[in-house]
Amino acid sequence: MTSVSALLSCVVALLGTAVLAVPIVRSASSTPVVYGASLVFSAVAFVIALAYLATALPAAEASALVLPLGLPWLGSHFRIDALAALFLVVVNLGGALSSLYGLGYGRHEHAPHRVLPFFPAFLAGMNLVIMADDAFNFLISWEFMSLASWAMVMAHHRDAGNRKAGYLYIVMASFGTLALLLACGLLAGADGSYGFAAMRMSDHTPFTTGLVLILLLLGAGSKAGLVPLHVWLPLAHPAAPSHVSALMSGVMTKVAVYAFIRVVFDLIGAPTWWSGVIVLVLGGGTAVLGILHAMMERDIKRLLAYSTIENIGVIFVGLGLALAFKANGMGLAAALALTAALFHVLNHSFFKSLLFFGAGAVLTATGERDMDKLGGLIHHMPVTSFLFLIGCVAISALPPLNGFVSEWLAFQAILQSPALPQWGLKILVPAVGGLLALSAALAAACFVKAFGVTFLGRPRTIVAEQALEVDRFSRAAMSALAALCLLAGILPGIVIDGLAPVTLSLIGDRMPVQTDIPWLSIVPVAESRSSYNGLLVFLFTLFSASLTAYLIHRFASRRLRRAPAWDCGFPEVSPATQYGGGSFAQPVRRVFGTLIFRARERVDMPAPGDLRPAHFAVETHDLVWEGLYLPIAGAVGFVAEKLNHLQFLTIRRYLSLVFLALVFLLLVLALWS
Amino acid sequence: MVLIAALFVQAFQMALVVLLAPLLTGFIRLVKARLLRRRGPPVIQPYRDLLRLLRKEVVLAENASWLFRVTPYLIFAATWVAAAIIPTFATGLIFSWTADLIAIVALLGSARFFLTLAGMDVGTSFGGIGSSREVMIATLAEPSMLLIIFTLALIAGSTQLSSIAAFMTSTQAGLRVSLAIALIALVMVAIAENARIPVDNPATHLELTMVHEAMVLEYSGRHLAMIELAASLKLLLYISLIACIFAPWRLASPGAGPAVYLAGLLAYLAKLAAGGALLALFETATAKMRVFRVPEFLGAALMLALLATLLRFVSRSL
C-alpha cells in the first residue's frame, strides 16, 4: 500500500467517524467514541506522513493516486510529496492532540451534537486539501474544510457575538474560495487542464503570474489572516470550543500557508522579484499589527487569535524573503529563508495549540475568558500554569525554546540580503527586519501580560479563587505539546534536516546538513560561521541556575518567613488595584496606539473636595475595519437598496430590461471580436 | 591539553565576570559621588551589601508562588551565561559558538521576561507598574539592539562575537559612518537596558519614577542578592560588549601565551574603568526623563540603528 492510499484510508475513516457520529450523538458515550476514533486515525496518518518525510530522498517519486470520482473526465487526483507530507504532519499531529484534549474537554460541552459530527469532518477536510492534486479536488476540499469549521464556530449560536463571528467568517471564506477559484482558472490556462501536474508544466506570462499571486494572497491570505483580510479571524477562532480554536488557529492557518506555498513555489514557476516585495510588505505589516491588537486585548482567546495573525506575518516574511532570493537565483539563501518559514509553521502549530488548550483549561476551571476577572491561577492550577508558561516563553521567541530558533533563522536569512541586486529589496529588507524584531519584542510583552494577568497576582473574582486543575487528558495533550516545544528548541538541527527535502524539492537547494556538525549546533551558512546551540544554552543555563541555587542554599541563610506583601508599606486591600490587562498595556498603547489605533484617553478627574466619582475611558479605532470594511459594507448595502426596486417592476418593464440586456451583451460580443 | 586550557580560560572568564561585576558598580557609585563632591561609600560596598543580604532571612509575600522564588536564579543564570560568552579579555572562548550576539540579546530577553512576571506575581500595583513600563522600554530597546546587530553582522560578516571582534581588530574595519551611528545607538540602548539615568534611576525608591526597582520591590534576602548581582552583571556585560566591539585592543587569541592573556586582562580592566567613569560622568551631567519621554529617546536609538543598517545595505564602504 502506498503512502497516499494509506493516508486516504485514514481520511475515509475520519469521514466515516463523522457520519457515524450523527446517529449516536445524543448518547452519553458519543464524546469518547468520536474523539477516540479521531485520535487513532489522526495518529496513524501522522505516523505515515512522518515516515514519508523522514525517508523522502531528494529525488524520491511523489506518491500519487487517481480515483474515478468527481468530474467525469477528470477523476480525483491525490498526491504526496515532501511539502504535502510536512503539512500533513502538522495537521495530523494537531488533530491527534486536539482529539486527546477533546476526550477531557468535550465532557464539559453542553451542546456536543453541534461539535462532534463536524470535528472529524474538519480533520478530513484539511487532510484532503493537502493531498489534492487537481484544482477541482482542491477547491471542494477547501470549501468542505471551511464549512466544517464554520459549523463549529456556530456551535454556541445563541451568543450574539458568535453569530456575528459566524456570519463574517462565512462571508470571508466564500470570498477567499472565489479568489482561489479564479486563481485556479488562470493557472489552468486555455486548454482547461485542471490537474496540478499540467499547471506545473505550462508556461505563464508575467501578467498571469502577478494576477495569480494577488488572487492567492486574497484567497489563502484571508484564510491565514493576512492584514487587511484578518478581521474575521479574531472573532471566529475564539468562538469555537477551545480544542477547535486550537485547530483553527494552530493548524487551519497552516493549510492556507500550504496553499500559498504550493501555488507560488511549485505551480507558478519562476517567481519575479517584486512578488517578494509584496509578500514581505504584507508579512511585516501583518506581524506588527497583529501583535499590537493582541496587546490591547482583554479576552484571552481573542488575544491568542490576534497573536496568530502576528505569527502568520512572520511566516510570510520568511516566504517573501525566499521568493526574493529564489527570483535572484540565490539558492542557499532561499533555502534558509524557506526553512525559517517552515520551521515557524511547525513551531506555531505547537505553541498556539498549547496556548489555546491552556485557555480552554482556564475556561473549564473558571468559565471566564476575560483576563481582568482572573488572576492567581498559578496556585490552583499548577500543571496548567506551568505548561502555559512554557507556551508563552516559546511564542515570545526566547531561548532555549523553539520560537527562538525560527526567529533566529529568519534573522540569518535577512543578513544574506545585501547581496540582492534590486534597490527596492535592499531598502525594504532591513525595514522588514526591524518590523520582525519589533513584533518579537511586542510578543514577549503581550505574553507577559497574558500569563501575568491570568495566572499571577491575587485572584480578582470568586471563580478565579475557586478554580480547580483540569482533567488528565487535557494535561496530557498540553504536556505533549510543551515537550515538543522544548525538543524542537534544543534539537533544531534534526528539524532543519527534516525540512531539507521540502526546500530541495521547491528551490533545488538546501541548508548544510546540520546533524554532521559536532555538538548539535546549527550553522545556517557555513562560511559566515554564525552558530547557535540550543541544547548547550539550555544545559548551560540549567547548570548555572542549579549551581547558584545550590551554593546559595548551602552557604547563605536559608531562613524564610511568610508575611503580608510589603508594597511600600501601604498594602492595598482590594485585588482590583492590581495591574490588569488594560493597565498593563497602557504604556505600549501610548507609544504605538495613538498612531495605529487613534487611541484617545479621556480622564474626568473631579477637583479635590468634590465627591463625584472620577472617570477614565479609552477609545480605540480599528482603522482597517473602519477604513476598508465599513465602506464596502455601506456600498453593498446601497447597491442592494437600489436593486431592490427591480423586484417590483411590471411585466412590460421586465421585458424591456431583458431586451436591453440582450442588446448590451450582443454589443459587447461584437466589440470584443 | 588544548581542551583543558580552553575550559580553564572559560571557567576563569565566568568567575571573572561575577567577581568584577559588584566592583564595577561600586566604582561607578564612587566616581559619581566624587563628581558630586561627596566622599561616597568605599568601592567594595556592593560586596558587603551582597554578603549582608545573603545572611538575612527572606521575607516572602503570602501570595508569592514558586515562580517568584525560582526567578532570581533564572535571571542570574541567564545573565551569567550571556556574560560568559562575551569575549572580555580573550576571543575564541570554548563556549562562544553556543550562542551568537542575537542569542545573547535573547538570553537577556528571557531574564527580563521572568523578571517582569515576578513583578506581577505578588499582586501589588507597584510590581505591575514596574513590569508594564519595563516591557514598554523593552519593546523599543530590543528592536534597536537587533538592528545594531544587523549593522555589525553585515560589516563583519558574522553574528559571532569572536568573529566580530577579530574583524574589528583587523585593518579592514576602518572608520565607518554606520559604525559610529551604531555605537551611539548601542550606548543609548545600554543605558535603557541597565535602568540608568536618564531612563530610570538605579538609586531611587521614589515609587512613581522607578521601573526596575518597582519590579523587585517585594524581594528580600538571598533572592534580592541574586537580582542585584544579576543587575551588576548586566551592566558589566554591556560595557564589555561595547568594549569588545568598538575597542577590541589586546584581546588574546586562543592558544596564546600567559603574557598575552595577562595583557588582555589588564587591558580589559582599563576598558571597564574607562566605561564606568564615562557612564558616571554622563549620569551626573543629565537629569532623569519623564517615563513617557523614554519612547522618544529610544525611538531616536531605533531610527539611528535603522539608518546604520540601511547604510550598510546600500553601500559597502559606509
Image: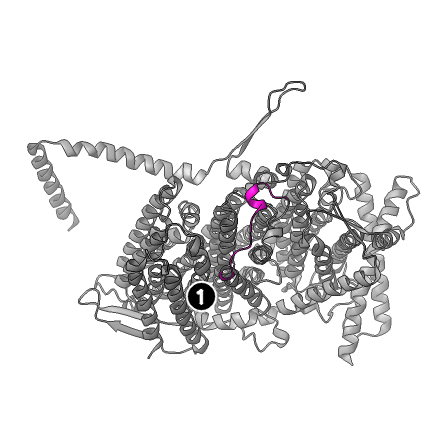
Q: A249 left or right of A445? A: left
Can you say whether A215 is above or below B204 in the image? below
Is residue A463 magenta-colored?
A: yes
Q: Nearer the viewer, residue A404 or A387?
A: A387
Q: B264 left or right of A631? A: right
Main SS class of the magenta portion in the image: loop
Which residue: 30% across, 56% down?
A143
Which residue: 40% across, 62% down?
A32
Which region is colored magenta? A458-473
Q: Nearer the viewer, residue B26 or B132?
A: B132
Q: A362 left or right of A259? A: right
Q: Which chain is home to disc 1?
A: A
Q: Residue furthest top?
A: A609
The image quadrant that residue B296 belongs to is top right
The image quadrant that residue B261 belongs to is bottom right
Q: Nearer the viewer, residue A346 or A623?
A: A346
For label 1, the residue is: A93
Q: Residues within 10 Å of mark 1 (few under 14, many from 20)?
A: many
